[in-house]
Amino acid sequence: MTNWLQDLRYAVRQLRKSPGFTFAAILTLAVAIGANSVVFGALDALVLRPLNVPDPETLHAIGHENDAFGYESYLNYVDYRDRNRTFEHFAADNFVGAALDTGDGPARGWGEEVSGNFFDAMEIKPYLGRFFHASDEHGPNSAPFLVITYSYWQNHFKGARGVVGQTVLVNKHPFTIIGVTPPEFLGTLPAFASDFYVPIVNQEQVDGESLLNVRGNHWISEVVGRVKPGVTPAQAAADLNTIQTDLEKTYPKDVSHVRYFLERPGIANAFGGAIKAFLAGLTLLTGLILLAACANLGTLFAARAADRSREVALRLALGSSRRRILRGLFSEAVLISLVGGGLGLWLSVMLLRGLTTWRPFPEFPLNLPVTPGANVYLAALLLALVSGFLFGAVPVRQVLRTNPYEVIKLGANPHIGRRFTARDLLLASQIAICAVLVTSSLVAVRGLAHSLHTRFGVEPHNALLVETDLSMAGYSGEAIPTLQKRLIQELQTLPGVTSVGMVGPDPPLHMGWMNTIVFSDQTTDLRASNATAQVDLYQISPEYLQAAGTALQAGRNFTWHDDKNAPRVAVVNREFARKVFGSESNALGGYFKRRDGTRIQVVGIVEDGKYTANLAESPTCAMFLPLVQFPSNDVWLVLRSTRDPQQLGAAVRTKLRAVDAGLPLFIQTWENEMNGALFAPRMAAMSLGVLGIMGAMLSMTGIFGMAAYSVSKRLRELGIRVALGAQRKEVLKAALGRAFKLLAFGSAAGLLLGFLASRVLAYVVYQATPRDPAVLAGVVFAMALLGLMATWVPARRALSVDPAILLREE
């Protein structure tokens, strides 16, 4: 311990003598450790961390192999629940929005419709009151009970314990609050900040339509199960697949062919693996950042050891052991790693806490639960220690091979060899890593630029969206289409409004969407396996296409005469026409069937577009049906106007409040609504841009250190060259030729690897391709600029060599 303390004090004194080296080393490691801590913190919170429930390892989400989101019908869920032999509990969970009136007027809240056994499956206890159970369910709308979350209780009831027993209006239906969830329970999807839980048998009161007895309608967003002791996930999945096979045979028209598997519940799996793929890519890139930092620090430590060669030689000549010298060097490395790691960890914790409170989508109660836990701190400590030993080990061979007599005899400027060394390989690797990061960031930025200037099938500019759900205001049946038509007529009278349309249940590029299957007109066996295509479904009013800016390619638009008494008609996109009818010319006037056997005639064809909240989606079939023929209570009004959005929004709110003050409204521009679709490419561009800047900074310091070291060790040689009449170009080539060769080789290797790594971005960023000439030119320019900036100071020093002064000093 005494020797270790002596080594530590000596390391501190040595580092204080070289403040520039110490600052550069600590900052380099802080950047690398901070980046890795942020990504690992997000990975830990979103993928690795189990749910905060008892025995989380036995709780599984039910995934669909051929459907990333895995929606399920209620009747199918009941069959799985009652017929399986491998689950202790099998619970359903569906995310919903509703108008909650606690006495101050209706306000939109977000919650979950759950089966009666949901809280039993979670194995949690209420913080206040009680939970509802399966025994409380006695048919549709039989359990008007409400369990509110701890945060909703604190925000809306100020923590009053008398809340249990109070009546709350949910879409104007009375529900009794019976309990409060514990504060640590965040549900099966922690990123969704629920306000309440309601029994799924009361779904009609919450959603405005009864779906409990419709087997073909898949609306339940998540099914979770807790397996029995001794049962493996594979056995439980096989049990479900056996039931599924029987359901396919029993209900061929309503049950599609799917295969189930079990996965960990949480946000990463809920979004079809896209988050896991993105975080895996970021983890790889931040790992490269750390390797680049270690290579940089290894180069700096090797150069520092070379600068201290005479000191090491004198200590060896005076009897010091090589082990003691190496221990001192490792002490310096570990000290730098701990200080740099601590600084990087502090920065990452601040950033993660900021991400936790970030609300990227104000419409939804979404958050990123990435509060750092003990795993993040432990990982940062391990990374710091391992990094310290990695770059601290670089000069070991140099010290072990030091001959004190040769070093002292050669003087202060020993001969610099011309062969490539381990330091050169480290620097080349670092430059290659930087080129990978720069390539990936430029690919992401170009993909984002394409996303912002592409044709989406709608024109979000100068369009305002107004979301409302008429069932939340108590409307049902024939009152819904009557009011919808009136709302459109009222908004058409506003000054500056050129067209008004309505779409339900969601507009294109929204984070929620509805899809269904269709059959060719010749198909008689309407089993799901015989479907011609899976299509995205929209119910629209007349003038929606004009308001949305969707171009009609052929045929006609809907009119108000396309009502329930008229033949069933549809407008489809070009991809639908090609896939279902073989060509666009065959589609117009042709018929297709829905899964209930309804024949629908195509009367119009519109341009292709983007429909889900993912601009990187493949070409998708889309079908637009008349809202009057196929009503929807959850709708969005689309207003195209020439007015300022804020002024128009205020006028819209006043106009609609005059119609019905109880209507829940959410008003925003369509460009703002598209933040959901642009979230992934923006995050990719921002994250990779930051990583690219970090990589460039590390490479600049590495190239600068190597070039400065080379020039300082060859000053005498350069002075002789100048004295003998060498030209400036020849002096620069002698001084910096190796650095430029390493820059060229490293950049070429990194560009090739960047092309391969950028393929991952195609899953996140629309039109992200490394083959873009602008990307290639940008990478070449960036790396050349990086090299010039890094070698500028060493080049000036080499060109300012005065041979008379150097030879006089010698």
Image (tube, grey):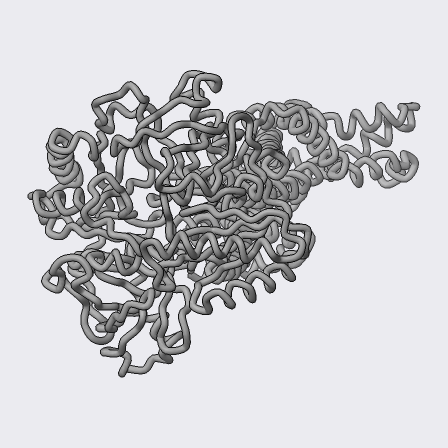
Q: Quadrant of the C terminus?
A: top right
Most foreground residue, 619 or 542:
542
Provide residue 688's location: percent of width, then percent of height: 56, 41
Is residue 95 depicted above or below 594 in this figure? below
**Coordinates of residue 167 in the picture (x, y in percent):** 27, 76
- Residue 304: horizontal and vertical position, in percent? 64, 44
Give whichever of 387, 746 is nearer the camera. 746
The image quadrant of residue 577 is top left
Q: Is residue 21 left or right of residue 341?
A: right
Q: Residue at point 32% right, 31% down?
A: 517
Residue 395 shows in this picture: no
Viewer-side residue, 124 vs 4: 124
- Which quarter of the rendered picture does the N terminus lie within? bottom left
**Relative to residue 230, is residue 30 drawn left or right?**
right
Q: Residue at x 25, y 62 (%)?
A: 198
Q: Measuring from the top left, give residue 160's x and y in whole percent.
A: 32, 82
Q: Is 54 on the left or on the right of 359, as rendered?
A: left
- 399 in relation to 383, above or below: above
